[in-house]
Amino acid sequence: MAIYMVGDFIREKRLRKGYTQEEVSFGICTTASLSRIENGLQMPGRYMLDKLMERLGYENSVFDMFVSKEDMELYETVQEMVRNIADDDYDELEVQIAKMEELTQNAPKLEQQYLIFAKGQLKKHRGGEAKEVMDLYMQAIHITLPEFDGKTPLHQNLLTFDEITIINNIAMQYAREENFEDALRLGFWLKEYMEEKMMDGKQKAVKYPMIVFNMSNWLGRGERFSDALKMADTGIDFCIKYVSWQQLPKLLFNKACALAELGRKDEAKKFFTQSAVLFESTGQHGNKQITVDWCKNKYQIDI
């Protein structure tokens, strides 16, 4: 049985995908550092290892290791912030941000990226100015993608999961300002990137449907209802294929809205009903009631 060393694994996956060391290491570490890692002369910390693996399109489920107590504590704090944001627990997020600031005082900038993004999320939740929120997002993304102007996709760059998350939130900020053109441009970039370069896994199962849901929503708000319908169908098919249920009732809702706007109300009623049932069965009673009220008040459809 072959035994993989970290560097061997990274080098093999990189060469198999045809990526250069410069593409994989850009913004994460120097090319020389990656060369040393691949040759077994340098051991990356857990955070750097995760980011290198993500650039290769993989989740790091192979090398579960920490090189120090501080490395482990940093990793666990980032994971806690991710959970806080997912759970809308912003009081606890504020606690974790303070902890992370202490841990990263003398850390490389890479390890501060998610911290700065989390500050943007907290500021947005606390009613901060849109410009202040966007400035924090841009500060975070510029740590690894300094050439990104906030609007123009960098199709030549490989992306980490954190970079995808930050860019998606930049797109969401544009949509809040009714700037659907820039929001969709970034959304299509992320969608195509995940389809072409990300391996199937937990992160893709979470992020891809969320981005497709956003895009179907933005297309509908821009009155591009046929495109919104196709996008919602893409997301629904993905959720069913990969047993990813979180965004499914929302995508069904978007599909129903697009159908109703296109005058296909009988079909819309079917998908509004499916959406409401899934919301109810997953304990999202508020979303279920919103669905019932929305289709009745806007489209005169009773479900």
Image: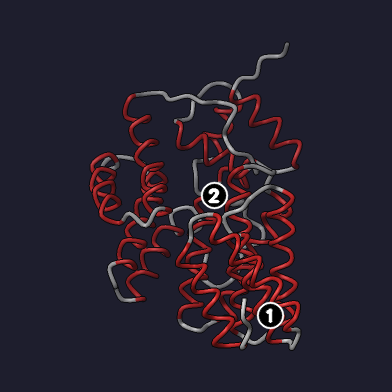
Q: Is residue 265 left or right of residue 46?
A: right
- Specify the amino acid type for callout 2: Phe
**Residue found 71% across the figure and 30% down from its top:** 12
Instruction: Check the image and name the residue furthest to the top.
Output: 1
Mark number displayed over residue 140: none
Q: Amino acid at mark 1?
A: Ala
Q: Which residue is mark 2?
A: 161
Residue in view at x 25 percent, y 43 percent = 99
Tag 2 near tag 1, CB within 8 Å: no
Q: Residue furthest front?
A: 302
Mark 2, secondary structure of its residue: helix
> Which residue is denoted by mark 1 in the rendering?
258
Secondary structure under badge 1? helix
For this rendering, which residue is in front, 267 or 191?
Answer: 267
**Alpha carbon distance from label 2 to label 1:** 30 Å
Q: Quadrant of the C terminus?
A: bottom right
